[in-house]
Amino acid sequence: MTARTRLTWQGGNARLTFGIGGDLPVSLLSVRPAGAGEPAAPPEEAAAPPLVELQALGHGRFPGSHRYADSTVGARLRHVRHEESADASWAELRLTQRDDVSGLVVTSVFRAAHGVPAVRAWTEVTLAPGAEEVRLQAVTSVVTGAFLADAGRPVDGMDVVCADSDWVAESRWRRAPLREVGLVAMDPEAHHHASRSRFPVTSRSSWSTGERLPTGAVVAADDSWALAWQIEHNGAWHWELGERRAGAYLALLGPTDAEHQWSTVVTADAGFTTVPVSLAVAAGGVDEAFGALTHQRRALRAGRSGTLPVVFNDYMNTLMGNPTTAKLLPLIDAAAEAGAEYFCVDAGWYDEDGHWWDSVGEWRPSATRFPGGLGEVVARVRERGMVPGLWLEPEVVGVRSPMAGRLPDEAFFQRHGRRVVEHGRYHLDLRHPAARAHVDGIVDGLVEEFGVGFFKFDYNIMPGAGTDAGGCAPGEGLLAHNRAHLEWLDALLDRHPDLLIENCASGAMRMDYAMLSRLHLQSTSDQQNPLLYPPIAAAAPASVLPEQAGNWAYTQPEMSVEESAFTLATGVLGRLYLSGHLNRMAPEQLALVRAAVAVHKDLREEIAGALPFWPLGLTNATGPWVATGLRAPEAGGGTLLTVWRRPGADPELVLPVPHLRGADVRPEVLFPGPETGAAEWTLAWDAERGELRLTSPESGPAATARVIRLR
């Protein structure tokens, strides 16, 4: 038996310490920024969970529970070898273990981008020569209890930060002590066992963010330390926090048998790789943790960032899926005058009879809506100096579509030999070559015929647990389709490298970094009430890069100056996603839109390098005052704020900006400016307290907002 040793590996700006050897599995003892010094409390081997937990048929857990902990395979893993490598962008560590009973060989892979306080991790499972095949029922991408030792806090001193999400009610963050969410205090010595309680968070089917977000953090109650994570998968996933006999654990997984009807067989010829996850660490609280994740997201998108154009989309609170040539041409002209650079024709461009929901799938332009052809509309977009775009829902075929009969059954999701039907649509199975050929033909044809440079890819159904076509478990079929979908996107962008694609799924129901590491823009919500949008827009940067956060700005001609400023401000510090009946506006109203677009264009490169923060708290973003901020990564850099005053708010607000405490700051309203007719706000900076005091007119409108720079 080898002696237990410590392996310290620094990749990028993250330093990881592992326990290796001895008669124990490998464990991840510490995850720290490179310059943060040693852990506040020395990590204890006895408190450390195995780095990998595997549930396999015939092996199970000991003791039994609902948890992704205490697996007998995970406890039997022993270190075999480890290898380090690096290139110009990433450093990598591969740690291999083996279970001699099952014959499973497990490699944990960690990759870190240079300068980023985070790591990406996944698990690769193979079978040793001569071993019998094993059916896996769950495999963790990573497990660690490092947050307690690194923070120097017990379970009683740690909080969890996580979010619920739903259609038009996205990104609702909450914070609670671990003891209050499910890690129940008990006496493990009296019972001779660890607690079997846990705090589980699960997303099912293919809306990866349809109920919960795959992002979270454990934070010291005094905001002195935080470990954040995201599961980078466009399908089903699970994460949980639990307590051990000594210490605690965080487990991050893709699909599982118990939650998602997933299992797979590992043979000598076929292994399995889990979905990737990222861990980010910060010596601070919530803002610092999500700042570290922001750095990681930019590293994941390296080489794919592209340009940041202002997109006008005709849907939201405007044409609402009913475009025609007569309606579009004046809207195109007005969007160009407002400063839009792309123009997207949204849903309905293929519809002949107004009943298109269950007949989509051919994606041919309507002849009745466009008597002169869709080409006439596209030509006007180009004449006005904009790039044409189209809405598309490529993964579905309506039950009344001719394509439903032309494609074989095997090209669709199936259960027990019958096609899965959801909300009047069949779901394409992109594992099948006929399905891939169909979607390739549609997209390539629209690009070649009309010169489309932007697609809004929507996704409005879920197919349930998945597909068992080919004899697999439904969750296994879904995972394979999810991965085929990503391969399809990669190939599409390789063929059309200048194409920009929005990731929309009924608003933000698939807002994950499997998708967003590839695609360019994320619609943050389908919320049509401008008064309800600010909390969603303010919270979005915890899940998505600010420069990808497509916050709708759908001002209308019947709005007052302040009401228009309110909805336009919602988009300025994200990725301004413009809509509204601009063609019906008076010149001074269109000038206000033009001013918002101009401010956004001036700021967008700054936005693309900034880190988010929440002056009123990420988990306190639903009051009458809502605020979000962006700050430069380097000390002394610029700071930007959007502040919304909603009905019921007091006219005055004090905003803490702690990273500028002691600095000489000059606050300035960037939008709306005095030339727009907007009322003047008073801004006063208290350097000693690091606070900005805002005063809006007491007799002013119920809804108003300002975009502010702190110089």
Image (cartoon, rainbow, N blue to C red):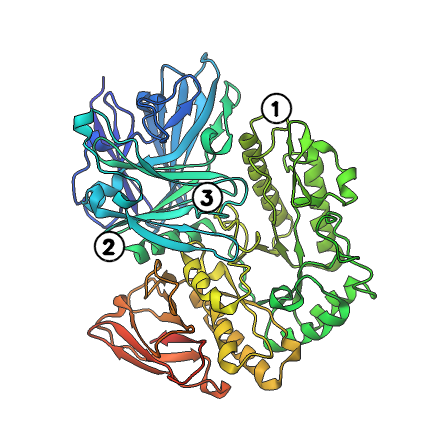
Q: Secondary structure at mark 2?
A: loop
- State the residue at coordinates (53%, 81%): 560
Q: Position of residue 437 (x, y in %)?
A: 71, 40
Question: Badge 2 is on which residue?
Answer: 223
Above or below: residue 19 compared with residue 438: above
Foreground pick, 238 / 19: 238
Front position among marks 2 and 3? 2
Left or right, 291 with reference to 179: right
Q: Tag 1: residue type? A: Gly
Q: The C terminus lies in which quarter of the figure? A: bottom left
Question: Badge 1 is on which residue?
Answer: 471
Distance in Å between CA atoms under marks 2 and 3: 26 Å
Q: Secondary structure at mark 1?
A: loop
Q: Position of residue 620 (x, y in %)?
A: 34, 61
Q: The N terminus lies in which quarter of the figure? A: top left
Disc ID at residue 232 = 3
- Local packing at callout 2 (Cα closer than 10 Å; few below 14, some 14-19, many 20+) is some
Q: Is residue 13 visible?
A: no
- State the residue at coordinates (66%, 47%): 394
Foreground pick, 503 / 384: 503
- State the residue at coordinates (50%, 30%): 262
- Local packing at callout 3 (Cα closer than 10 Å; few below 14, some 14-19, many 20+) is many
Q: Tag 2: residue type? A: Asp
- Local packing at callout 1 (Cα closer than 10 Å; few below 14, some 14-19, many 20+) is few
Front position among marks 3 and 1? 1
Above or below: residue 142 compared with residue 553: above
Q: Position of residue 113 (x, y in %)?
A: 38, 47
Displayed quadrant of residue 388: bottom right
- State the residue at coordinates (63%, 76%): 582
Distance in Å between CA atoms under marks 1 and 2: 49 Å
